[in-house]
Image: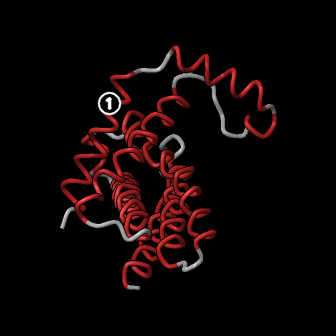
């Protein structure tokens, strides 16, 4: 219960910090909200006793979790130089951005941990369970970024969406995919193993 309360407070402070200080990082608020939704799905899966709701929450987590990986690309659009950070307004923007990064990474890892714990998977098999999720997330993120593939396309025009997947598969960067997977795996190994 303590994780539930603290994570919600952390989310509120992060969202208010980004909104109040007008941090100008591409898609940061979208990534932050996707991380909140991923975390919510993890909590729903963990605390739900109904297997159907648990499965729906797990699918929701698998939908929102890959969007959290966008935080690593937001580092490219930083506008601050070392000299600018120490000005009063820029410093608070930068601190709000760092708070958002910490929240997004910790919520992504916590949502994976909640997903594993929701199904009472023993410690021995937890890593074997999260590896496919991490691979899927890296694959989905790289597939979306390798072309103009939007998730709303599956609703508006499903045939064009699946044709876009085939096109993007040809442009998929396997180095980026493996790097994103390794970053997730290292973060899991460092931060989540007890």
Residue furthest out toward the right: 156
Residue 9, how many percent across, how many down? 44, 77
Classify residue 188 as left or right of residue 66: left
Characterize the local packing of mark 1: few (<14), some (14-19) or many (20 or more) Cα atoms within 10 angstroms: some
Residue 73, how many percent across, how many down? 41, 36
Placement of 154 over or under 31, stated as above or below: above
Quadrant location of the C terminus in the rendered image: bottom left
SS under mark 1:
helix
Which residue is at a point 77% across and 26% down the rendered structure image? 159
Residue 42, how many percent across, how many down? 48, 66
Residue 190, how many percent across, how many down? 18, 55
Q: Is residue 79 visible?
A: no
Classify residue 20 as left or right of residue 91: right
Classify residue 121 as left or right of residue 14: left
Placement of 2 over or under 56, stated as above or below: below
Quadrant location of the N terminus in the rendered image: bottom left
Determine which residue is flagged by label 1: 178
* Residue nearest the observer in this picture, 47 or 29: 47
Q: Is residue 184 visible?
A: yes
Which residue is at a point 81% across and 36% down the rendered structure image? 156
Classify residue 189 as left or right of residue 155: left
* Residue nearest the observer in this picture, 83 or 126: 126
Which residue is at a point 43% across and 68% down the rendered structure image? 119
């Amino acid at each position: 219960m303590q994780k539930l309360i603290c994570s919600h407070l952390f989310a509120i402070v992060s969202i208010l910090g980004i909104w109040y200080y007008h941090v100008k990082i591409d898609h940061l608020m979208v990534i932050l909200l996707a991380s909140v939704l991923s975390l919510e799905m993890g909590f729903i899966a963990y605390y739900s006793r109904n297997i159907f709701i648990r499965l729906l929450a797990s699918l929701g987590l698998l939908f929102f979790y890959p969007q959290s990986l966008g935080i690593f690309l937001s580092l490219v659009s930083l506008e601050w130089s070392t000299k600018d950070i120490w000005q009063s307004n820029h410093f608070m923007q930068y601190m709000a951005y760092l708070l958002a990064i910490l929240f997004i990474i910790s919520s992504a890892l916590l949502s994976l941990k909640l997903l594993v714990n929701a199904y009472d998977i023993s410690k021995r098999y937890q890593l074997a369970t999260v590896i496919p999720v991490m691979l899927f997330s890296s694959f989905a993120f790289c597939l979306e970024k390798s072309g103009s593939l939007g998730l709303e396309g599956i609703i508006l025009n499903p045939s064009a969406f699946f044709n876009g997947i085939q096109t993007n598969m040809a442009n998929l960067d396997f180095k980026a995919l493996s790097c994103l997977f390794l970053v997730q795996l290292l973060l899991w190994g460092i931060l989540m193993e007890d």
